[in-house]
Image (spheres, grey):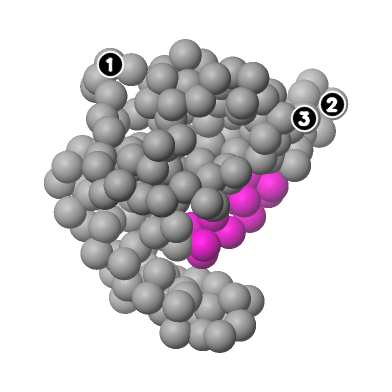
């Protein structure tokens, strides 16, 4: 769906008090999207429900960040991550996402829940260059799997050099 949408280069924003909310099944298909999500992304509820959440993925978002996100939530842990998404018309918007597994009383995971807030501009001044480096590393490899592994290694190396974990890094900027 979103793959064929040309990018406009225009950034959309939303109010600091707004929270974008979505819920997915175990495969990442949307089962709920709040009005703020629908409004900023430019889609109707009918266009979103049942779609993979990745249909709003912006092509400038490094794959290794999504791998880290999926690895974390599938391990029944929460994660915070900065994400740039693509709107229906090709605009984009940045969020600070908090993604959690929905854990049932028996301990099983039935889906995932994401709340997204307006990111701080100071944080994006750190994240955008990092994501550009990770994306460039992914692009240096003809094989997507090799590119993903290389960008993941680059991210882990940066965190190791800083003496921190991803979650602590994200919350520190």
Please indicate whether residue 38 sits to the left or right of residue 107 in the image. left
Local packing at callout 2 (Cα closer than 10 Å; few below 14, some 14-19, many 20+) is few
What's the CA distance linking mark 2 and mark 1? Answer: 34 Å
Magenta residues, start to end: 63-76
Please indicate whether residue 85 sits to the left or right of residue 73 in the image. left
Mark nearest the camera among 2 and 1 is 1
| Residue 77 seen in this snapshot | no
From the image, tell me which residue sits under label 2.
Answer: 106
How many numbered markers are drawn?
A: 3
> SS for tag 1?
loop
Which residue is at the front of the view, 78 or 43?
43
Magenta region includes residue 159: no
Residue drawn at (47%, 47%) of the image: 5
Mark nearest the camera among 3 and 1 is 1
Along the polypeptide, which appears first: circle 2 or circle 1? 1
From the image, tell me which residue sits under label 3.
Answer: 110
From the image, tell me which residue sits under label 1.
Answer: 17
């Amino acid at each position: 769906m979103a793959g064929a949408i040309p990018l406009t280069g225009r950034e959309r924003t939303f109010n600091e008090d707004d929270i974008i909310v979505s819920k997915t099944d175990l495969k990442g298909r949307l089962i709920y999207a709040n009005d703020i999500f629908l409004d900023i992304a430019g889609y109707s509820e009918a266009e979103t429900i049942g779609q993979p959440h990745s249909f709003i993925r912006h092509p400038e978002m490094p794959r290794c960040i999504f791998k880290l996100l999926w690895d974390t939530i599938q391990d029944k842990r929460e994660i915070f991550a900065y994400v740039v998404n693509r709107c229906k018309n090709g605009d984009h918007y940045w969020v600070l996402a908090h993604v959690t597994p929905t854990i049932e009383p028996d301990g099983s995971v039935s889906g995932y829940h994401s709340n997204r807030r307006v990111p701080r501009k100071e944080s994006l001044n750190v994240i955008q260059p990092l994501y550009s480096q990770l994306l460039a590393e992914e692009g240096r490899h003809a094989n997507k799997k090799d590119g993903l592994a290389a960008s993941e290694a680059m991210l882990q190396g940066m965190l190791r050099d800083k003496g921190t974990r991803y979650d602590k890094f994200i919350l520190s900027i």
